[in-house]
Amino acid sequence: MAFRDRAEAGRKLALKLKGKIKARTKVVALARGGIPVGAEIAKEVKIPLEIAIVRKIGSPFNKEFAVGAIAEDGNIIIDHQAIERYRIPTSAVKGVIAKEKAELKRRIKLYRKGKRLRLTPNTNIILADDGAATGLTIKAAVKMLRRFDPDKITLALPVCVLETALELSDLVDELICLSTPRNLDSIGSWYKNFKQVSDDQVLKLLKTLTKN
């Protein structure tokens, strides 16, 4: 299955979610790639959207290769096996973490005007992203969201590596995934248009949802 873009993926997920929406439900979209996905879900099923900030911790030698993730509440997930296997110096990883912390603060200020996530206990959360390969960012996000004492966390993904999907299904209450390939070259290979989501696009989507 290939998606035209993230918005189409969001609409297809919304079809799977209709009928599952309870009272006190919010979509929490992971910035930035998950925002167009989450925005379409929120629009289609008519529930509020929140944006959560989680950053991948890339290898100092190849930033696209994830060795961990850090959420906006400061919790960090590290793939220690990868760090040991590729002999990545701890000092170098700490340097990447420091940069990502600064980026987290920048995005919180830009997207939410510095405010905290608006989540209350017993909320039903639909956590949305544009896909998952290692699942590290989602693991960090779920760990953060559990601290809000939600009634339920439903993870909604267009595509996820099968092995990762099995891991993530143990961390959330429900997993809805449209495609679970055994192997995945990249998340982008499942999209016809997988251009990076810009800050301007995020702000425009938020403005549109606020109007509606």
Image (cartoon, rainbow, N blue to C red):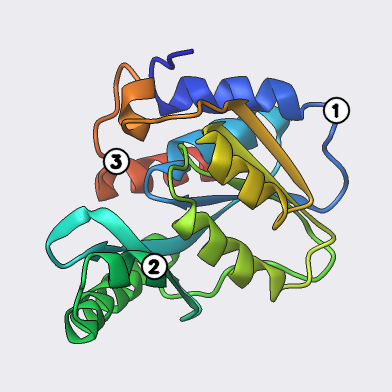
Give the Cα separation between the discs numbered 3 and 1.
30 Å
Left/right of residue 212 with respect to residue 201 in the rendered view: right
Q: Which mark is residue 19?
A: 1
Give the Cα separation between the discs numbered 2 and 1.
41 Å
Give the quarter of the figure containing the C terminus: top right
Residue 8 shows in the view: yes
Q: Write the residue at 49% across / 51% down.
A: 135
Q: Position of residue 133 (x, y in %)?
A: 43, 43
Q: Nearer the viewer, residue 154 or 66?
A: 66
Quadrant hosting residue 164: top right
Q: Secondary structure at mark 3?
A: loop
Residue depth check, mark 3 versus mark 2: number of the one nearer the observer: 2
Q: Which mark is residue 197?
A: 3
Residue depth check, mark 2 versus mark 1: number of the one nearer the observer: 2
Q: Secondary structure at mark 1?
A: loop
Position of residue 31 relative to residue 158, above or below, is: below
Q: Nearer the viewer, residue 70 or 93?
A: 93
| Residue type pointed to by label 2 | Gln
Q: Write the residue at 69% across / 34% down.
A: 176
3 or 2: tag closer to the N-terminus: 2
Q: Position of residue 127 (x, y in %)?
A: 62, 49
Give the Cα separation between the discs numbered 3 and 2.
30 Å
Q: Position of residue 104 (x, y in %)?
A: 34, 71
- Give the residue at the far front of this rendering: 85
Q: Secondary structure at mark 2?
A: helix
Q: Write the residue at 78% across / 72% down.
A: 149
Q: Which mark is residue 81?
A: 2
Q: Position of residue 123 (x, y in %)?
A: 79, 60
